[in-house]
Image (cartoon, rainbow, N blue to C red):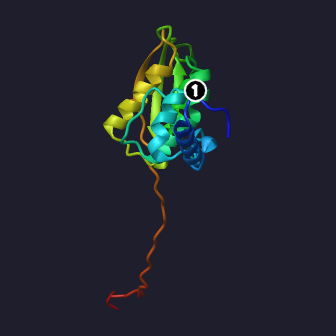
Amino acid sequence: MTKSLLPPNAGALDRAAESAVVNAIATIPIPHRDLWSPDRCPIDLLPWLAWAVGVEGWRSYWPEALKRERVRRAIEISRTKGSVASVRRVVESFGGQIALREWWQTTPKGTPHTFELVLTLTDASGAETSAAFVDDVIAEVNRTKPLRSHFTFVQGLAAQAGASIVAAGRPAAYARLDLAVQ
């Protein structure tokens, strides 16, 4: 047994109670590595892990895959906060793609410290792309962009379709009729 937390004048009953409690606690498994892993953390403890690694926006209606991805990328987003790379990582963590064009990349040059964000969300994250979900993405972009910058938002649309060629033939026989009178 480890050192006791009881005072030196503790009685035998106190020491027996302490021993029983220590032995009972020792049998409880504590999966420390799992608790700090975004992939293995129990879903009911995931919001606490998100809070611990600095995820600022959290919604209970997000699907589990999206929540785990947000936690997985939280530290790298925080490290580059205030840069174009962090904006890209935030949108990627939501399962989207962006086209980002800063003010100096436009012709003619735009207003300094502005950028245009074209966001295309896909259903790869399992999240429904509702207006509230898009608002969540915009809020996260606002948190990670440079503070002096302002942006215009354009939502893109991703669609996937296939094309196939279908042909049908109808056999026909043509005969030339000579109706000229002789």
* On screen, residue 91 above or below 159: above
Residue at the (58%, 46%) spot, across then down: 39
Residue 97 seen in render? no
Residue at the spot 61% in from the left edge and 26% down from the top edge: 8
Query: Quick one: which residue is furthest to the bottom in this view?
Result: 182
Position above or below: 82 against 165? above
* Residue carrying label 1: 9
Q: Estimate the x, y position of residue 37 in percent, counting from the top left.
A: 60, 41
Foreground residue, 108 or 58?
Answer: 58
Front residue of this view, candidates 16 and 116: 16
Q: Quadrant of residue 77?
A: top right
Splitting the image into 4 quarters, where does residue 20 fall? top right
The residue closer to the viewer here, 139 or 21, is 21
> Quick check: 136 left or right of 165?
left
**Residue 3 shows in the view:** yes
The quarter in which the N terminus is drawn is top right
Q: In the rendered image of this protein, does residue 87 appear above or below residue 124?
A: above
In the image, residue 105 lies at what x, y percent? 56, 17
At 68% from the left and 36% from the top, the residue drawn is 2
> x%, y% of residue 162?
48, 59
